[in-house]
Image: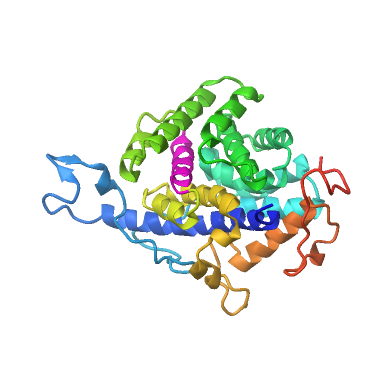
């Protein structure tokens, strides 16, 4: 393999967590811009009509690093009620403890973390994709098994069936990246073919997602700019969250080898930036690996306890990296997760090392 599979696991999880933070920085600037008084013609406004450019946060996020985003701001609404990152961490811990996917335990995770808040009832497909990211990673080597697990998980969580096609599309992209079969030029056609050939019912949500993905393919081929792409992907939305799914694919596919740039572009999209930026980070991180993270981000997540920066997912970057190490060890068939060290990672090729069943 070009890069170790462990590095791809880490890249997906860490970039997703960092994307959540970066996206919140983008949303912060979005609301600050929205609250600015209108003094005549603003940038991007012509003949009384708001141009796409004025709907994006005109902020340079390239200097952003973990820890820069304030914990709270009076200009930003209350923190999201659906904590997809917290659920992703809890699902990871459950997989590590049990060594396999167990439907009852995953249900308990959902029940425990959503018992005090009904915000989960409005969770979008993008947020649910982040919540189930550990499952996508754990079953990446068997897309049929991955599909069944995601479907059963959504059913157990009593989530809208409209989220199913989106999660299968993201899971397929993650699997392609981890097995080094992801070709940015053919990812969309292959994903659409996978969805159509799978067990997903030919429902309206599936057709809606396929249409969105086809739109992404056209935008990428035509080299459409970010501002125009965002406006087109927002137009005519039918299924909640599909715009974010499409934008994540678009930003990844237009800059597949530049994880930093893909995430920064999503951060400028406004209110929905946190979940969408996290999803972009997950796909890009799985493709570019841990090495794709900017050096400044890696330094900010140094394992020294005195310098660790807590992320919005409730853990520091170093803690998420260690948790991902353990998840990878269990996937590879290791019985003792504490045995994993930075110098002796357990690497397993799909179909080669399988001491025990993960069903």
The answer, for residue 119, to whether it is visible in the render is yes
On screen, residue 262 versus residue 49, left or right, reads right
- Any magenta on residue 243? yes
- Residue at image coords 54%, 50%: 284
Q: Is residue 316 above or below residue 97?
A: below
User: Which range is magenta?
Assistant: 239-255
Q: Quadrant of the C terminus?
A: top right
Work out whether residue 31 or residue 355 is closer to the camera in this orientation and state it: 355
Residue 286: x and y in percent read 60, 50
Q: Kindly give the residue lying farthest to the right in the view shown.
A: 355
Q: Which secondary structure is most common in the magenta stretch? A: helix
Residue 86: x and y in percent read 60, 54
On screen, residue 304 versus residue 232, left or right, reads right
Residue 140: x and y in percent read 69, 43
Q: Kindly give the residue lying farthest to the front in the view shown.
A: 2
**Quarter of the image where one finds residue 292:** bottom right
The answer, for residue 76, to whether it is visible in the render is no
Q: Kindly give the residue lying farthest to the top in the view shown.
A: 202
On screen, residue 174 versus residue 58, left or right, reads right
Q: How many numbered marks, from 0 up?
A: 0
**Quarter of the image where one finds residue 340:** bottom right
**Quarter of the image where one finds residue 198:** top right
- Residue at image coords 29%, 56%: 58
On screen, residue 68 versus residue 96, left or right, reads left
- Which color scheme does this rendered protein use? rainbow
Work out whether residue 109 or residue 66 is closer to the camera in this orientation and state it: 66
Residue 261: x and y in percent read 43, 55
């Amino acid at each position: 393999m070009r890069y170790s599979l462990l590095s791809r696991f880490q890249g997906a999880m860490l970039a997703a967590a960092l994307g959540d933070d970066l996206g919140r920085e983008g949303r912060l600037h979005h609301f600050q811009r929205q609250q600015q008084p209108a003094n005549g013609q603003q940038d991007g406004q012509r003949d009384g009509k708001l141009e796409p450019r004025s709907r994006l946060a005109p902020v340079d996020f390239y200097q952003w690093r973990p820890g820069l985003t304030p914990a709270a701001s009076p200009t930003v609404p209350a923190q999201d009620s659906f904590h997809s990152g917290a659920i992703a961490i809890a699902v990871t811990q459950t997989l590590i403890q049990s060594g396999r996917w167990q439907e009852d335990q995953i249900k308990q995770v959902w029940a425990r973390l959503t018992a005090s808040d009904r915000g989960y009832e409005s969770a979008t497909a993008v947020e649910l994709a982040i919540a189930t990211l550990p499952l996508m990673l754990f079953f990446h080597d068997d897309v049929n098994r991955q599909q069944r697990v995601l479907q059963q998980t959504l059913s157990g969580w009593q989530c809208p069936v409209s989220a199913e096609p989106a999660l299968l599309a993201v899971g397929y992209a993650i699997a392609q990246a981890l097995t080094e079969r992801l070709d940015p030029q053919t990812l969309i056609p292959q994903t659409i073919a996978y969805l159509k050939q799978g067990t997903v019912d030919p429902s309206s949500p599936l057709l809606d997602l396929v249409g969105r993905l086809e739109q992404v393919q056209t935008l990428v081929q035509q080299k459409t700019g970010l501002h125009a792409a965002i406006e087109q992907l927002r137009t005519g939305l039918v299924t909640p969250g599909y715009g974010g799914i499409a934008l994540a694919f678009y930003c990844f596919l237009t800059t597949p080898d530049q994880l930093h740039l893909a995430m920064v572009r999503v951060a400028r999209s406004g209110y929905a930036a946190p979940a969408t930026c996290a999803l972009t980070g997950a796909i890009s991180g799985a493709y570019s690996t841990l090495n794709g993270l900017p050096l400044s981000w890696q330094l900010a997540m140094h394992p020294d306890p005195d310098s660790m920066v807590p992320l919005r997912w409730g853990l520091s970057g170093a803690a998420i990296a260690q948790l991902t190490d353990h998840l990878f060890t269990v996937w590879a068939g290791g019985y003792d997760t504490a045995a994993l060290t930075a110098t002796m990672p357990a690497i397993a090729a799909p179909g080669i090392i399988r001491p025990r069943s993960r069903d």
